Amino acid sequence: MRRLGAGGMGEVYLAESRTGLRLAVKVVRAEHAEDRTFRARFRHEVRAAQTVGGAGTYTARVVDADTEAERPWMATEFVPGPNLRDAVLDHGALPGPAVRILAAALGEALAAIHAKGLVHRDLKPSNILLGPDGPRVIDFGIVRALEATALTRTGAVVGSVGYVSPEQIRNGGQVGPPSDVFSLGAVLAYAAAGREPFGEGQDSVVLLRILTRDVDLSGVPDGIRPLVAACLAEDPLERPEPAEVLAEAGFTPATLRAAVHPGWYGPAAKAGPASADRPSGVEYLAPGPVTPASAAGPATPAAAPAPAAEAPAPAPGPVTATAAPASPLAPTTSVGRLGPVAPGRRRLLKILAGGAVAAAGAGAGGWLLYRGFDTESMSGSYRSPGSPDPGVAESKASARSAVLRWQYDLGGLGGLGGLEGACCALSPDGSVVYAGTSGGVLHAISRDGSRRWKVRLGDDVSTPVATRDAVYCVVGLHGEGVRRLTAVSPSGSPLWTRTLGDTAYAVPVLLGADVLVSTGGTDAGALRSYAPDGSENWTFRTPAGPTGTPLVAAGVIYTGSYGDELLALDARDGKRKWQVAGGTDVTVLALAGTTLITHSGPVRQGFRVSDGRRLWRRDADAGPLTAGNRALAVGTEQGTVYAVRAADGTRAWAHDVEGSTAEPRAVVAGDTVYARAGDRVWALDLNGGRRWDAALGRAAAGDQHGPLVRGSRLYVPSGTGIAAVDLIV
């Protein structure tokens, strides 16, 4: 009948049997179908799954399957309702009674699954459908089959960050039924509080929180919190049995059935006006005006709210823009340095499971844990993709102060998507803001802060790039195992998708009207250029993957590689212009005039852009450079913004800022450096002097996205979303 979606296992279609029964048919991807070991395990798991189901089990029953077909498939009963992730994303935390029903039903479902010798291994909000007759668990047994694929044979573990048990991290996926109970506890905490119990941030950080029991249950109601805490016990033997969860939630099987009724999980979703030309899967809402400052009530001094990790995220409403204060944000004179920097990505990865690396990529659920493999830091040239020096041409005069115009919450699940980079992208005319989330949603926001549309694309949507005709993003950075480049029209209609493979890293960059995607890891990689219609213009393959985000300027693409080479390619055809030795895992940082500045281990170097000749070499312990103009490149390290001279690599100045343990993120626009640090934005001149700083509210914990400037508007990460700041000249 129609396509419902896709995942690491394959595609899902809505079908109808001859008797009128509606089914969800999952068709296995061709690459899995060719794997004999996968087929054997898929056959075994499907047979076991077919024995689970029936009245009162709260699982989606497997109705039929063909494990011997050219592309194996299985059909489960179709459940008319949203998954738990989307329900919370759209409407906030579930009411207390609904959480109790959810707990009891999931306990029943796990009891039925475990009774047949199965372990789910990937219980998470998106694998729980909220049907009119109660929740239904899906995809049990699927992860076990995926663990047999060639992708995951070499010591990898499949699961979803934030919902895996400690033993699943430590033991390489060798888990039993108690692991599912731990995942159940995390699911209930998410449903009750409307936010991730182990917080947001990079996968490695979240996994470390699980191992160190750094869990936030402050938003979970008192009545359900003891049950959630028991499920999250570190010792598997101390967790309750699924049948005990049913009883602790206050139900018997009979009373649970009596409690479930249509709409049991909360108010029905409010859809926008129907229209024949609106694509399915896109939620439209009528644009809501931002409350004028004069109507917003008495002005209050701007103050930093509590960190997002410490306060419950507000339930997302139809329009999540917030009115601006009535007066400019008051500058302060407080400056200083911070304490010790938080552990970097490389150190965190080594902590996890004795050196395991959380890498984006698993089929069913979200991530793979590779053992015995190391990776370099992902730091590098993270700037507004495809838009060199954003705002420079439009900045006529220096801003004297700033006004917080609005704040947009990206939803209860997930903050900004991707690894780092700009916090958002803009349409060419600046009238629309586009932002991807780690929860798999692409948002389009009007300049006034009202939501135009949102479309669900999958796990972890990168920071997008936008042209007049399309918005491009990479989907599945921390999820499905297979990355996809997706093009969406300015109205939110999906245009086309191109599979990028299971590469560890994928970044979109604009090449005029075309889009460039850099893919790879420490192994082989590639740069690919796609036309607006999705056809491939050219591919340039590298023996080792590109590092960081390619820098594009004057029709030339500059990139480093894990093969220690620095390359310049012609953006029109991908032909190599020059290639030189750049040092270990060389990463392009910034272009300052005619000097390309790179980072390689503890060394920073300058290269002439015309031919790659090295101009200078400096030891550099500071953090990566993030922006530049013709004479200077601006960088950041813990608590400090600094500038490096393009001519010789020496430091021109340094300015201490008051922020968090994370590095500030900076952008240069005209003669001003804007830096996001902790709960403030700082404006510095190109000599390092402070112009002003203003409190805007703290960005989400672990957020590494940078600001974006267009004309007199500055966009920065804030809370679990984006803040728009008007620059006052």
Image (cartoon, helix red, strand yellow):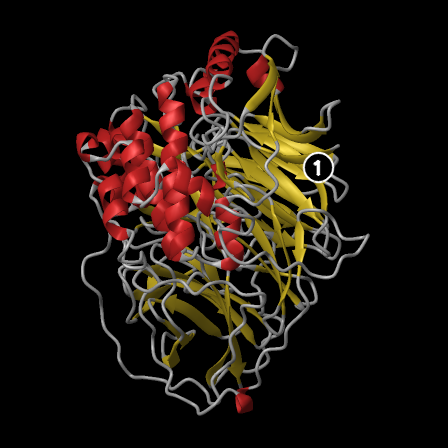
Amino acid identity at mark 1: Asp
The residue indicated by pointer 1 is 573
For the question of whether residue 380 can be seen, the reply is yes
Whether 529 is drawn above or below 97: the answer is above
- Say whether residue 501 is left or right of residue 494: left
Q: Residues within 10 Å of mark 1 (few under 14, many from 20)?
A: few
Within the image, what quadrant is residue 29 found in? top right
Q: Residue 261 or 489: which is nearer the viewer?
A: 261
Q: Give whichever of 428, 147 is nearer the camera.
A: 147
Q: Secondary structure at mark 1?
A: loop
Determine whether, in the image, residue 483 is placed left or right of residue 237.
Answer: right
Give coordinates of residue 472: x percent, y percent.
64, 48
Q: Residue at x 26, y 42 (%)?
A: 210
Q: Residue at x 65, y 10 (%)?
A: 69
Whole-percent x, y for residue 62 in the image: 55, 22
Residue 170 located left or right of residue 531: left
In this rendering, position of residue 480 left or right of residue 27: left
Q: Residue at x 73, y 24 (%)?
A: 19
The percent position of residue 500, horizontal first and vertical second, equals 59, 32
Q: Residue at x 67, y 37 (%)?
A: 497
Residue 195 visible here? no
Name the quadrant of the N terminus. Answer: top right
Q: Position of residue 655 (x, y in %)?
A: 31, 71
Vertical placement of residue 600 versus 638, above or below: above
